[in-house]
Amino acid sequence: MEPSQTYQTPEIIWKYFADFTEKEKTQISKLYTLYLDWNSRINVISRKDMDNFYLHHVLHSLAIAAAFQFKAGMQVLDLGCGGGFPGIPLAILFPETSFLMVDSINKKLTVVKEVAQELGLTNIATRHSRVEDIRDKKFDAVLSRAVAPLKDLWTWSKPLLRKYQTEDEQVPNGLVCLKGGDLAQEIFESGCKPYVWDVDTFFPEPYFAEKHILYLPFRK
């Protein structure tokens, strides 16, 4: 990526996704302005990342959609959602899937709620909580973006997962993580054997060179 190049408009999204409806395209296109406004009041995204908003945040979140599909009626938890990634872009693409956005910092959830309301996203709910304290719901999938080590993520997620009745391997039933860097030690310490995809196999952009999708299916 050239140092002067920025991603403040969604053309990079249309490069890789051709199946958005016009409504969804409008929602995606509004994201930058909404986050620019909210970020001036509640800082949830760095200035550098705002300059590359659609590449660093929206397209990175949609890497999950390049690997998986979510079905109508599925219940998905975005664990430590921060300002709304990956959940908000995925909620736009999968409007019939329900997303619960959970974070321990309430001001970040304020941004999520306001952005969802402005976009008319009725499939997003929020909860101000530590994930360890959630006991009243079960989910078909748990998502995470650079929140904690894999060992901790799996410890937190496993009690919250239920077996989803599908034979489609593209429909996730388990933990899906977005992570970067060399993960060999982290995976070893977790004692888990996740499936791993390199994001740049889906989106051949320099930014994704060391970014990965990890998937741990839930098996009782």
Image (spheres, rainbow, N blue to C red):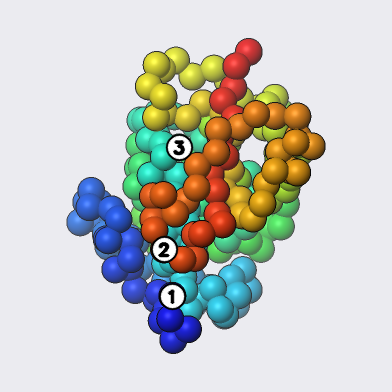
Which residue is pictured at 71% across the width and 57% down the height? 105
Q: Secondary structure at mark 3?
A: strand
Q: Which residue is mark 2?
A: 205
120 or 102, which is in the foreground? 102
148 or 3, which is in the foreground? 3
Q: Secondary structure at mark 2?
A: loop
Give how far apart the Cα atoms at labels 3 and 1 are: 35 Å
| Image marks 1 and 2: residues in contact by CB distance under 8 Å | yes
Give how far apart the Cα atoms at labels 2 and 3 are: 30 Å
Quarter of the image that includes the C terminus: top right
| Any part of residue 17 in sight | yes
Report x, y in % for residue 136.
Answer: 67, 27
Report x, y in % for residue 176.
Answer: 56, 38
Most distant residue in the right direction = 189
Q: Which residue is mark 1?
A: 1
Q: Is residue 23 above or below residue 41?
A: above
Give how far apart the Cα atoms at labels 1 and 2 are: 8 Å
Task: Specify the amino acid type for callout 3.
Answer: Ser
Q: Is residue 139 above or below residue 207?
A: above
